[in-house]
Image: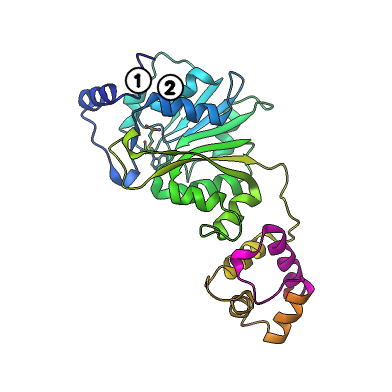
Amino acid sequence: RQKAIATPNKTKEILNKFGFSFKKSLGQNFLIDVNILERIIHHAGINKQTGTIEIGPGMGALTEQLAIHSNRVVAIEIDQRLVPILKETLEDYSNVEIVNEDILKANISKIIDSNFETDQKIKVVANLPYYITTPILMKLLMDRLPVSSFTVMIQKEVAERMAAQPNTKSYGSLSIAVQYYTHASVVMNVPKTVFMPQPNVDSSVLHLEVRDSPPVEVEDEEFFFNLVQACFGQRRKTLRNNLARHFSSTLNKEQIEIHLNKAEIDGTRRGESLNMEEFARLARAFTIKEK
Ligand code: SAM
């Protein structure tokens, strides 16, 4: 613990030694507090059998803790300048693999196949680069990788949106998209002071437990997600109006009402009041006519 990378002094020492300068465009805000890291590890629920994937290891602050507490870490980092640094900071750990790639382009299935046992539990743990949090998580979820959970530090507001329940300000199509694949919860809020440099936004740790199967029956996922998005299209408008807009080229007002009735959903409601099951009912009712 004394040797931990995640302290202000150690981080500065590494910065100086390698003449490293942070790239804001890559969302480089490094953690300098071991205590926070241990709490993230705790929430991730990993043990010495777990395989872990980290996105954006930076200088290895979290990677080190994952190496200590899990079976094996594969850390995917886009910034080539960090590769020699990580080689040195993590030299004491033989269970770490650094992959110098862009997470959005990497073949993660292949990385999993070549680094972990077929029956091994795999978890993603990361302090994500904030500028691409949503694309990263949506890509990994939609790819349906053999990953059992995600425990990620992200921007507080985004975490709240992903875990939001109906009738709240944060609830929207992102809540449905994430919760279709996972059970989502915000497990802790994190102050700016644990980062170097400090970010402009507040952070939270979001835990996503991947579902074995979707919570609702949906025939065509793309159609479902587009419909959900349309229902939140203009938040102040009624469901009826948002749907009329979305289906303006295929359905008239009477037909919209017929489908709403079939789904047993009141068209004067607002999108933000519908739960996932109701959105699924809506999608099923509208799909029949559409095809
Ligand atoms: N894990 C380190 C820590 O907690 O101190 C660093 C976290 S920092 C918020 C985000 C890291 O993600 C940076 O190291 C950055 O270079 C890396 N990164 C940014 N975009 C990436 C991408 N598309 N693919 C992989 N890594 C990326």
Indicate which disc, 1 or 2, sits on the residue closer to the N terminus: 2
Mark 1 falls on what kind of element? helix
Judging depth in this view, the residue of 110 and 156 nearest the camera is 156
Judging depth in this view, the residue of 238 and 216 nearest the camera is 238
Residue placed under numbered mark 2 in the picture: 64
**Residue 136 inside the magenta-drawn segment:** no
Residue placed under numbered mark 1 in the picture: 89
Quadrant the C terminus occupies: bottom right
Check the image and tell me how it is coloured.
rainbow
Residue 270 left/right relative to 97: right
Q: Which mark is residue 286?
A: none
Position in image of residue 184 (x %, y %) = 59, 45
- On the question of residue 173 being in view, the answer is yes
Residue 161 left/right relative to 248: left
Inspect the image, locate mark 1, and give the three-letter code of the amino acid beneath it: Thr
Q: Is mark 2 within 8 Å of ligand 1?
A: no
Quadrant the N terminus occupies: top left
Ligand 1, seen in the image, is in the quarter at top left
Residue 112 left/right relative to 2: right
Q: Residue furthest front?
A: 167
The magenta stretch spans which residues? 262-288
At 51% across and 53% down in the image, what residue appears? 161
**Residue 277 inside the magenta-drawn segment:** yes
Q: Label 2 neighbourhood size at 10 Å, few (<14), some (14-19), many (20+)?
A: many
Q: CA distance from mark 1 to mark 2?
A: 8 Å
Cβ atoms under marks 1 and 2 closer than 8 Å: yes
Majority secondary structure of the magenta segment?
Answer: helix
Position in image of residue 99 (x %, y %) = 45, 31
Inspect the image, locate mark 2, and give the three-letter code of the amino acid beneath it: Glu
